[in-house]
Amino acid sequence: MITTGVGLAVSAVRAWTRLYTLGLPPELRDRRRDEIESDLWESVQAGRTDATLAWQIWARLIGGLADDLGWRSEQVVGVAPLVFRLVATLGLITFLGLWLISAASPRIPEPPAAPRFPPLIDPPPPPPPPPPCAPPGFPSAGSSPSDPGVKCQR
């Protein structure tokens, strides 16, 4: 049984094979696709662990891209091979350049913490002090002869 990792790798190889053999004469195209399919079948039947097999298939796919494009450019005759080689080379250089730029670009740093500002509204003022006490011998405010009034603390 093929696991998801191996299945994805095999599907990627098949898709790449269909792409670079597109436009070839049918007998040449089918022969190349059969060669790749046979190689995939032998790899799956070899009895390796699934993780190892998936990595091996991916590595062979990536490592063989230039060879596949070279094989493809040898299969056509006339002006088309030159155009194909030019487009394939520029595409490969563009892909590798973008990959290198993305790998070498610095990581975006975390933004600094937001500043803490003092509150915009002042707190309310403290309550006023109590009124002063009347001097000795003077009656305090609001007192009557029958009511001695509130005594001040001195």
Image: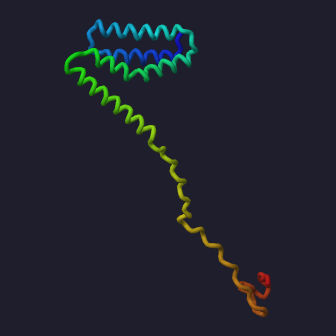
Does residue 50 appear left or right of residue 18 in this picture?
Answer: right
> At x 27% / y 13%, what residue is drawn?
24
* Nearest to the observer: residue 33 or residue 74: 74
Q: Quick check: can you spot residue 31? A: yes
| Image coords of residue 44 (percent x, y) | 51, 10
Does residue 2 appear left or right of residue 38 in this picture?
Answer: right
| Image coords of residue 106 (percent x, y) | 47, 44
> At x 39% / y 22%, what residue is drawn?
65
Does residue 65 appear left or right of residue 51 in this picture?
Answer: left
Q: Looking at the rendering, in which quadrant would you find the C terminus?
A: bottom right
* Nearest to the observer: residue 81 or residue 129: 81
Q: Looking at the rendering, in which quadrant would you find the N terminus?
A: top right
> At x 41% / y 20%, what residue is drawn?
64
| Image coords of residue 140 (percent x, y) | 74, 87
> At x 69% / y 82%, what residue is drawn?
131
Does residue 101 appear left or right of residue 22 in this picture?
Answer: right
| Image coords of residue 124 (percent x, y) | 60, 69
Q: Is residue 60 above or below residue 39?
A: below
Residue 146 in which image quadrant: bottom right
Q: Is residue 59 above or below residue 109?
A: above
Q: Quick check: can you spot residue 147? A: no
Q: How is colour applied across the structure in the image?
A: rainbow
* Nearest to the observer: residue 133 or residue 58: 58
Q: Furthest residue to the left?
A: 79
